[in-house]
Image (cartoon, grey):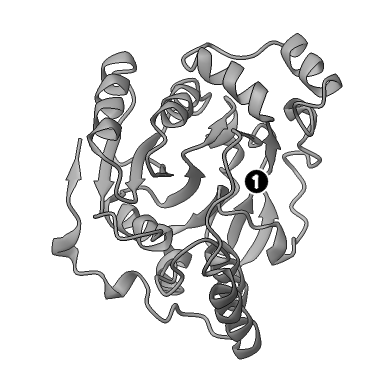
Amino acid sequence: MTPATSVIVSTYRREDALLAVLAGLARQSDPDFEIVVADDGSGPETAEVLERARHEWPDLAIRHVRQEDEGFRLARARNLAVLASRGDRLVFLDGDCVPRPGFVAGHRRCRPGRATCGRRCLLSESATATWLHTPTSAGRSAWFWCRSRVGGEVNRLPFLADPWSASLEPALSWTRFRGMNHGVHRDDYLAVDGNDQAFVGWGFEDSDLAIRLRNHGVRLVPAGLGSTVIHLWHREADRTLEGENLSRLEDVRKSGRIRATEGLSSIEVIEVATTE
């Protein structure tokens, strides 16, 4: 059967974090989803992690879409994964952001004309090391979170980080649209031609998508309760191309443009190779 949701998990050479993310997805309260791993050119170790996950959690439907390592091309990797996906609801998750059990259910309010914006709980370097020591753990206790919060190892308590009830959908600014945790209906994603692959290197490809979605008339709303993810610590990415990407973002803000300059439609379908 076709799943209602496709969770697009982007990754690049971070196998320990990816395993923790997959462990989180294995504990979801809403099981009606598939996973499509958007691999930006990792080595064979990532495929090995996915094989381990398929063995450990056989109920998870995991597909792997990989492109060659030609630098930071996150936008294109996500587009490739969308082409290989089947769900009407596209939920994007970074491979270092561990979902809580209500993550998929929290993005159910994503529908035509509504894109969902999730939140994140930031872990310190030391708390991340503790988490990754037991990546397949069934969860973390309230004591773990309270101790981490008091010790300054986490910026918020994740179970208190959802300010909106399931019935509230206030319109949000595009600045609340985070690449590591958002949902877009497939119809709207296709209408704006997906992520803009002109954004290479770190920065602003998610903001560009949010602005073009709004230009198309899509309302950005908070994801529901339980959608906050646990963002594992990592070293800061190379921001050499940040200025160029910011210039592209300013262009789309001023122009009111809807479609990507180099989007989903620029990819030949034959390029999309998946493994399951």
Residue 87 spot, x, y in % from top left? 37, 47
Q: Residue at x 81, y 16 (%)?
A: 146
Query: For the N terminus, which image quadrant?
Result: top left
Closer to us: 203 or 91: 203
Residue 262 spot, x, y in % from top left? 37, 77
Kindly state the secondary structure of the residue where label 1 is placed. Answer: loop
Q: Which residue is mark 1?
A: 118
Closer to us: 101 or 51: 51
The number of callouts visible is: 1
Residue 61 found in image quarter: top left
Q: Residue at x 66, y 23 (%)?
A: 126
Residue 77 spot, x, y in % from top left? 35, 56
Crowd rating for badge 1 (residues with CA inside 10 Å; few <14, some 14–19, many 20+) = many
The type of residue carrying mark 1 is Gly
Q: Is residue 44 above or below residue 243?
A: above
Q: Residue at x 36, y 62 (%)?
A: 76
